[in-house]
Image (tube, rainbow, N blue to C red):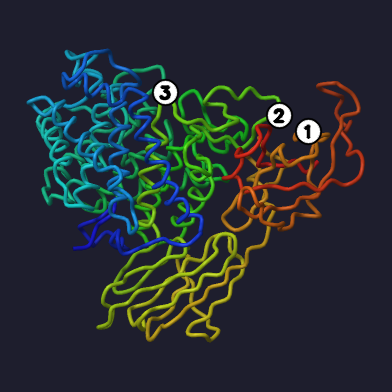
């Protein structure tokens, strides 16, 4: 039986594409995504398991189970850290070459602990069981009970799909049944202050086939926007309870909450339909990606409430850009890609993965950013987790590291899809795709590429592909490419962002994407970076670091010579990534005045200066110091 991944729709009439089985795609070689999965398997998962004990998350559950005494430690949603780690290990167990058996004892012990901690009525939330036993379901605005349940259900789904193991899902279903009795049709009209349960319930429906869970997800979505969470200093937008989803004009409020909700709405639409829901999703997507997204794919410009700002409010040095928000962007865009088959959604998955998400962790996978700024000033105080200059091993609010682990362990899920006997390739990485039987023959596609360091994507089929077509994504940043089919130069139509090669008798395909270094500027209403450019190459955004500048040159004094542009440099031996060489000059003020008379300038001094930039996702892996993505031109 095929192993299904995190998103596995049942209905087909509202979806353009279908995910391949999780075990049909195997990312191998030395590429960025495959290497990341190995680091996640070999280091990040073990680190997360260790930190669950250090942080007190497991101890909280032992206290709730009556196995030890003590007080609750951590944030109210600490249980969700445990569930996300269990989910990450679950998806790893379904990956070819995965190493989940290493954690078999931890998983068995933790499932047994959850069974022991669960109340007879199904309730399971260590914060309320330990700290506030008389206030269960009394504070939906901040309590996160349904949010935690959502992550518990998703962990259960992962293990049921990969190993056929049902005990963890059964724990979640007992709690879900209690929630259904309390909040289902005819029950309390209320929603959780942090959306998450919606998408989890839809996936439970897809696993069990029981429509009750889809109906409960639909009910929670229909109840959104009626202000049941109550007044709060952050306002109703923070909790995504300000306006019914069908009439929201765009994206607002807490970034993670917004896109978790949007992902759940997309899941409900996939199964139930409803043009108003789809129209709302399109409005949210357009608002985010046309006026509220950083060039790295980061989301959320406000620290106070981890929220989207106004249109074009995108300050690089005050970017909150929470790691979980970038992960939620991948989840939302994946569902929109499945619904529509349009390459713009895959482009945004790629942008977020290669920049905002990848930049959140060190090369060894054991230290992380919570927020991901696009500029760190040379003299900035970076000691606080929300103004980082260095990644750290864990956080008091530890939502991001285990969230990252569950995404990376299932990353092959987002690489390719199928539809009507055709194959669609969305992410380019060396590996294999088992297509099963196509035209009477078992077909395996073998992909070889150095992407995104180079733009060559070569595909060999073990047996001739005679399906509908092979669709290869042409990224939105691509300006030119070459296509070869069966060793012969070919043309193919590009529709919805994909080159579409007819599947008459395909034995090999080679796509060569041109990867020039480009300087890009921002929309003129992004005031914070007016007069600046960003260096890009393919999907990668580059950053300047103080570590790469001469000792006498402070980062803030460097200006780029936009006319000279930037050129590809060598592979950095320490970081393992291609550098870019940038020509510019030193800008030195004539006086120490903070606000000189208009018309005076800070002239460039001395000879031209050539510096190197690194891919944004690798910044902060060497010496501490300043960093900036947007570089002044004058």
Q: Residue at x 63, y 40 (%)?
A: 525
Residue 554: assigned label: 1
Q: Residue lying furthest left in this view?
A: 120
**Which residue is identified by label 2?**
378
Q: Residue at x 24, y 56 (%)?
A: 9
Quarter holding the N terminus is bottom left
Label 2: state its secondary structure: loop
The Cα–Cα distance between marks 2 and 1, rounded to whole angstroms, is: 7 Å
- Residue 222, position as x, y percentages in the image: 23, 37
Crowdedness near tag 2: few (<14), some (14–19) or many (≥20) residues, C-alpha within 10 Å: some
- Residue 507, position as x, y percentages in the image: 42, 83
- Quarter of the image for residue 233 reads top left
- Quarter of the image for residue 194 reads top left
The Cα–Cα distance between marks 3 and 1, rounded to whole angstroms, is: 33 Å
Residue 198 located left or right of residue 316: left
Residue 396: assigned label: 3
Quarter holding the C terminus is top right
Crowdedness near tag 3: few (<14), some (14–19) or many (≥20) residues, C-alpha within 10 Å: few
Say whether marks 2 and 1 touch (CB < 8 Å): yes
The Cα–Cα distance between marks 2 and 3, rounded to whole angstroms, is: 26 Å
Which one is nearer the viewer's eye here, 149 or 256? 149
- Residue 539, position as x, y percentages in the image: 56, 55
């Amino acid at each position: 039986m095929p192993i299904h991944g995190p998103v596995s729709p049942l209905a087909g009439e509202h979806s353009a594409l279908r995910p391949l089985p999780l075990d049909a795609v195997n990312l191998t070689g030395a590429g960025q995504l495959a290497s990341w999965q190995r680091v996640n398997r070999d280091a990040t998962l073990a680190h997360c398991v260790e930190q669950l004990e250090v942080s007190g998350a497991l101890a909280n559950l032992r206290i709730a189970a009556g196995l030890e005494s003590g007080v609750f430690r951590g944030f109210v949603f600490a249980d969700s850290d445990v569930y996300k780690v269990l989910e990450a290990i679950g998806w790893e167990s379904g990956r070819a070459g995965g190493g989940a058996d290493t954690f078999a004892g931890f998983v068995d012990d933790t499932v047994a602990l959850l069974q022991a901690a669960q109340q007879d009525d199904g309730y399971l939330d260590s914060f309320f069981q330990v700290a506030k036993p008389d206030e269960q379901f009394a504070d939906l605005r901040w309590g996160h009970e349904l949010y935690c349940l959502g992550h518990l259900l998703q962990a259960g789904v992962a293990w049921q799909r990969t190993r056929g193991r049902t005990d963890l899902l059964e724990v979640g279903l007992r709690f879900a049944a209690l929630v259904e009795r309390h909040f289902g049709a005819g029950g309390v009209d209320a929603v959780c202050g942090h959306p998450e349960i919606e998408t989890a319930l839809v996936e439970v429906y897809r696993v069990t086939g029981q429509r009750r869970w889809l109906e409960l997800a639909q009910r929670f979505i229909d109840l959104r926007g009626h202000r049941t969470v109550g007044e709060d200093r952050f306002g109703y937008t923070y909790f995504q309870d300000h306006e019914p989803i069908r009439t929201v004009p765009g994206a607002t409020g807490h970034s993670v909450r917004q896109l978790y909700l949007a992902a759940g709405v997309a899941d409900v639409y996939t199964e139930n339909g409803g043009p108003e829901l789809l129209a709302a999703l399109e409005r949210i997507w357009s608002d985010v990606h046309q006026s509220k997204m950083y060039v790295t794919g980061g989301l959320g410009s406000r620290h106070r409430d981890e929220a989207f700002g106004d249109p074009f409010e995108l300050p690089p040095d005050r970017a909150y850009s929470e790691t979980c928000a970038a992960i939620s962007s991948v989840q939302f865009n994946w569902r929109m890609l499945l619904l529509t088959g349009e390459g713009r959604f895959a482009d945004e998955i790629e942008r977020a993965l290669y920049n905002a998400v990848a930049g959140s962790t060190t090369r060894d996978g054991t230290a992380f950013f919570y927020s991901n700024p696009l500029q760190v000033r040379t003299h900035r105080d970076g000691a606080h987790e929300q103004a980082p200059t260095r990644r750290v091993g864990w956080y008091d609010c530890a939502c991001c590291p285990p969230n990252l682990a569950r995404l990376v362990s299932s990353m092959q899920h987002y690489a390719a899809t199928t539809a009507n006997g055709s194959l669609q390739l969305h992410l380019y990485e060396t590996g294999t795709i088992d297509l099963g039987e196509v035209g009477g023959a078992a077909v395996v596609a073998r992909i070889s590429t150095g992407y995104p360091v180079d733009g060559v994507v070569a595909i060999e089929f073990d047996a001739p592909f005679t399906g509908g077509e092979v669709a290869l994504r042409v990224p939105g940043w691509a300006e030119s490419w070459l296509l070869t089919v069966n060793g012969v130069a070919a043309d193919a139509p590009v529709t919805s962002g994909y080159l579409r090669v007819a599947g008459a008798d395909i034995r090999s395909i080679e796509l060569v994407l041109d990867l020039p270094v480009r300087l890009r500027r921002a929309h003129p209403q992004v005031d914070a970076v007016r007069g600046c450019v960003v260096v890009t190459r393919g999907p990668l955004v580059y950053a300047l670091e103080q570590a790469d500048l001469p000792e006498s040159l402070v980062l803030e004094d460097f200006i780029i010579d936009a006319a000279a542009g930037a050129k590809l440099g060598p592979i950095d031996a320490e970081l393992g990534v291609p550098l870019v060489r940038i020509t510019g000059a030193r800008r030195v003020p004539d006086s120490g005045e903070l606000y000189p008379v208009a018309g005076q300038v800070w002239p460039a001094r001395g000879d031209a200066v050539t510096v190197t930039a690194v891919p944004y996702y690798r910044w902060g892996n060497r010496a501490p110091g300043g960093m900036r993505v947007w570089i002044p031109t004058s």
